Amino acid sequence: MSAPDPLLEARARVLHDLGVRGLDVPSFVDVVDDAVAARRWWVEQWADGSVYVAGLVAQDVQDRLLDNGMGRWPACTACDDLVPHELRVEPELGPDPQWVCDKAGMSVAALGSLA
Ligand SMILES: [Zn+2]
C-alpha cells in the first residue's frame, strides 16, 4: 500500500473549507485543482516538503481567488471586527496549518476543519 497522497489530502482539506462556506462549486473547484497541479511538481522535487503542501495549496488558492476577482476566502466570522477580512494560514510554511484571524490574533480552526 502506498502512502496517502499529500496533494489529495490538501485538496480534500481545502474543498472542505470551501464547502462550509458554500463555495464548493465548479469554478472554485477548478481553482483548487489548478493549485494542486501546480504544487505537484514542487512536491516531486522536494519530498520532505510534502508535510507543508496543504498550507501552501490553501495559500495558493487564496491568492488565485483574489487574482481572479473571486473574492477573499475564507471570510473571518470568528471575531468582532466589523471590517471584512479573511483568515490567514499559519504557519505559512510548516506542518499542521491553522486558519488564524490576525485581527484578533486567534487561531480559528485547523485547515480542513472550518465550521
Ligand atoms: Zn477576524
Image: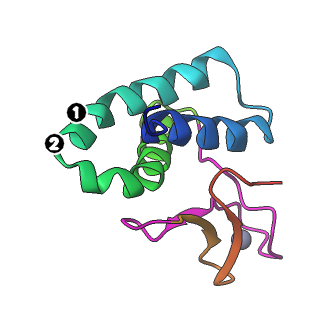
Residue 62 horizontal/vertical position (percent): 50, 45
Q: Quadrant of ligand 1?
A: bottom right
Vertical position of residue 54 compared to residue 40: above or below: below
Would residue 14 be found to the left or right of residue 68 on screen? Answer: right
- Disc 1 to disc 2, how far (Cα)? 6 Å
Q: What stretch is highlighted in magenta?
A: 71-95
Vertical position of residue 39 compared to residue 59: above or below: above
SS at mark 2 in the image? helix
**Quadrant of the rendered structure where residue 25 is?**
top right
Residue at position x 73%, y 61% from top? Answer: 76
Q: Find disc 1 in the rendering and name its residue.
A: 41
Q: In the depicted view, which residue is nearer to us: 2 or 61? A: 2
Q: Which amino acid does label 2 sit on?
A: Gln
Q: Find disc 2 in the rendering and name its residue.
A: 45
Residue at position x 63%, y 15% from top? Answer: 26
SS at mark 1 in the image? helix
In magenta segment, residue 6: no
Which quarter of the rendering shows the C terminus? bottom right
Residue at far top of view: 26
Would residue 109 be found to the left or right of residue 111 on screen? Answer: right
Residue 10 horizontal/vertical position (percent): 52, 42
